[in-house]
Image (cartoon, rainbow, N blue to C red):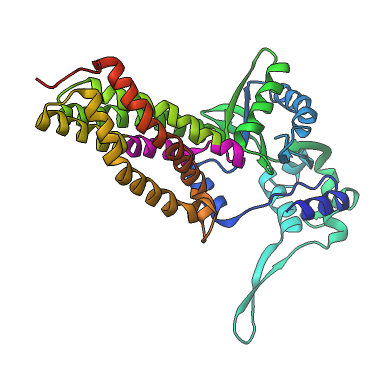
Amino acid sequence: MDGVRDEVNAAVPRLRIEFVQILSDVVNDLAGNPKPVEIKLFGERLDSLEAYARRLEPGLDSVAGLEDLYNGVSEPSPELLMRVNEAETGRLGLTPQDVGAVVSSALLGAAAGEIRTEDRPVAVRVRAPDSVRFDPLRLRALPVAGSTPLGSLATFTTAESRMNLDRENQQQMIAITADVSGRSLGGVMNDVRRLLAAQPPPPGIRLALGGLYESQQEAFRALALVLFLAAVSVCAVMVIQFESFVEPLVVLLVAPVSFVGALVLLLITGTALNVASFMGLILLVGLIVKNGIILLDFTRLRMRDEGVALAVAIREAARVRLRPILMTTLCTLFGLLPLALGIGAGSELQRPLALAVIGGLVLSTPITLFAVPTLLVAIRGADFRLP
């Protein structure tokens, strides 16, 4: 894409090009977000919107990672306006509609039957030659109602109009769109937001960010709610199991620290925090709790069966349960390793999820073995015993 883009820009500088990857383009169109970056400008005066869009274009064009920028200002379309003199046409017994039909037939053609070839019919249209259709001076000489020239019945003026007008929620809109290449969407949008803050819209113009960035922010808000509900659900299950609030809270306190490991690995590998990696953080909640349950359940079993103190029971639990904790953690890590390495078709889409889980588990395992017992002993006391 980069190579073709440079060649096209060098050959035809003003040509607007669009590079499409079939699957992602279909998905984005179905989601209503055809472009990753979309800046929507709303206002009553279209001239003001176009002027502000042109003012933003040089700054946006300099943002690294922003490609195929379109400022939303449509190219002017040349027009030839024809105004029919009703008095003149009336003297000939014609109406403006009759004159318009003659001109339409000359320019666009009139159906004149069809010719049948060996395997298909071919429609035939009769129109004026291109030398008349594309020459305003000769168009005025087009005969109407016999020998009356068109120029005596109508006047022609040249004009320009916009090729398309966009509205959203019945409001006049210009959409500045662009693709992203070589950088994460979040990094590019941070630069875009700084540019918009430095060049705020003038009075009468409202600015809104759309595209995939808007969908990403909505997905992050929804996933944050899912993360909260997952933590609450897991805590409720542990409260029922341990018949106490202390152990669940101690285990859940480890989760934010484990998220640090996930974010660090994403940063080291240059992977963006996107929807897939956020799903990995949600998955981490269950995996981290699993290790805590394995450790604390054995601790309570020793305290209940043998009546030993908390400090003694938790040390024995850490020694005995080290093997199953490491086995389950290593199985998960090696199971996710092919996905993290990008092996297999489509694996790059879920690679951020695998990296987030691997980074979180690597850090959470030693924290579960050392931080959880330390916090529990600090809260309960080393001599705490079950009633």
Quarter where residue 70 is shown: top right
Residue 120 position, x and y percent, is 60, 80
Residue sitting nearer the eye, 341 or 347: 341
- Counting every numbered tag in the picture gives 0
Residue 17 position, x and y percent, is 74, 49
Residue sitting nearer the eye, 308 or 380: 308
Q: Which residues are magenta?
A: 265-288
| Quadrant of the drawing holding the C terminus | top left
Q: Is residue 283 above or below residue 220?
A: below
Quarter where residue 243 is shown: top left
Q: Is residue 294 above or below residue 339?
A: above
| Identity of the residue furthest to the top in this view | 203
Residue sitting nearer the eye, 180 or 382: 382
Residue 179 appears left or right of 379: right
Question: Residue at (31%, 29%) from the top-left corner?
Answer: 231
Question: Residue at (37%, 26%) from the top-left corner?
Answer: 371
**Residue 283 in view (yes/no):** yes
**Residue 36 in view (yes/no):** no
Residue sitting nearer the eye, 147 or 305: 305
Q: Is residue 381 above or below residue 219?
A: above
Residue 158 position, x and y percent, is 84, 38
Question: Residue at (55%, 51%) from the top-left corner?
Answer: 24
Does residue 178 show up magenta in the picture?
Answer: no
Residue 225 position, x and y percent, is 36, 28
Q: Is residue 307 above or below residue 266?
A: above
Magenta: main secondary structure equals: helix
